[in-house]
Amino acid sequence: MLIFLFLISSLFAQAQKPSDVDIDRRLFMPRSLGLCGSMVARINLNESIYFNPASAAHSKSFSTEIGYAWNYSSELSKRRMDTYYVNAIDTDTDLFGGGVGYYKKKTKGGAGSEWEARGSINKLISKRLAFGLGISHLSYTYFNQASTNFNVDLGLLYLLGQKTILGATAFNLLGDDNNVRTRSIDIGARQAFWDFFAISLDMEHRFDKKINISGALELLYRNGMMINISARREQYTQTNFWGLGLGYVAPKLSIIYGTMNAINYPFSFTHSFSVRVFF
């Protein structure tokens, strides 16, 4: 709780121009925005495809999701960027679980576009420990410059107790000569206190850069209403964020909205909306 309060206070710190701009391409789904990326220590979420390929292994479910996100990118002369995405996870198997995801981003005005296809597999090593492997293929074109990137993620998830979860992910192990996607290690924890309240905390270290920290408070009421508030401090871009998530979560259907906004240069509001169906 003290760390989360520190994150909130850092939002009002004096803004500084970042030494480099490095956008986290995983931050476009509503829960990831509402939690400011505090996603590594989670169970039974489609976001596991992007944040921790091991984190869905402890569940037994099949779900699909479709969504839309939009934001204005100052790197692209404040042009609007639209993101369309679809994904699915299936962990109701005895051998391996896994998921697939696809997104397409387009910038209005012809500045460029990108798409990414991603897949993951996971396996329970024991009742408490799960392992996951993720692969991704990214292709982008901006200002007549095109490139592609293939990468690999590795993840672990450990149930320390009934209400305590620990997670760790090594992202983008193959790296990228163009620094489009950098290698990093993310360690996260989630502590539930009652059936309706939990705290999440993630610390990510990007190689050759600095650590960023994100934390979130989560409320889930018995009627299915969900509220998330979060904060994030990116040391490598010296940027402070806040996030908010709202939605309805039921056994068969989830409808979620999330937003994340930076206090200082160089980002602006990002909004996302999705519908998720469980089978």
Image: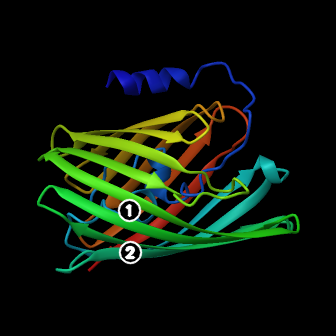
Q: Position of residue 16 (x, y in %)?
A: 72, 24
* Residue 183, placed above or below residue 174: above
Whether residue 40 can be seen here: no
Q: Is residue 60 left or right of residue 268?
A: left
Tell me which corner region of the image, top left, top right, bottom left or bottom right, holds residue 20.
Answer: top right
Q: Is residue 146 left or right of residue 105?
A: right
Q: Position of residue 190 (x, y in %)?
A: 28, 42
Residue for point 29% across, 64% down: 56
Residue for point 22% across, 51% down: 158
Quadrant of the drawing holding the N terminus: top left
* Residue 277, placed above or below residue 200: below
Residue for point 17% across, 37% down: 193
* Residue 260, placed above or below residue 27: above
Whether residue 274 can be seen here: yes
Query: Label for residue 99?
Result: 2
* Residue 161, placed above or below residue 56: above
Tell me which corner region of the image, top left, top right, bottom left or bottom right, holds residue 127.
Answer: bottom left
Q: Mark 2, residues whose alpha carbon is within 10 Å: few (<14), some, or many (≥20)?
A: many
Q: Nearer the viewer, residue 113 or 209?
A: 209
Q: Residue type at mark 2: give it.
A: Gly
Q: Is residue 92 left or right of residue 260?
A: left
Q: Position of residue 261 (x, y in %)?
A: 60, 41
Q: CA distance from mark 2 to mark 1?
A: 8 Å
State the SS at label 1.
helix
Q: Position of residue 264 (x, y in %)?
A: 69, 32
For the residues labelled 2 and 1, say whether their Cβ atoms are less than 8 Å apart: yes
State the SS at label 2.
strand
- The residue at which mark 1 appears reads as 48
Query: Label for residue 88?
Result: none
Quadrant of the drawing holding the C terminus: bottom left
Q: Residue type at mark 1: give it.
A: Ser
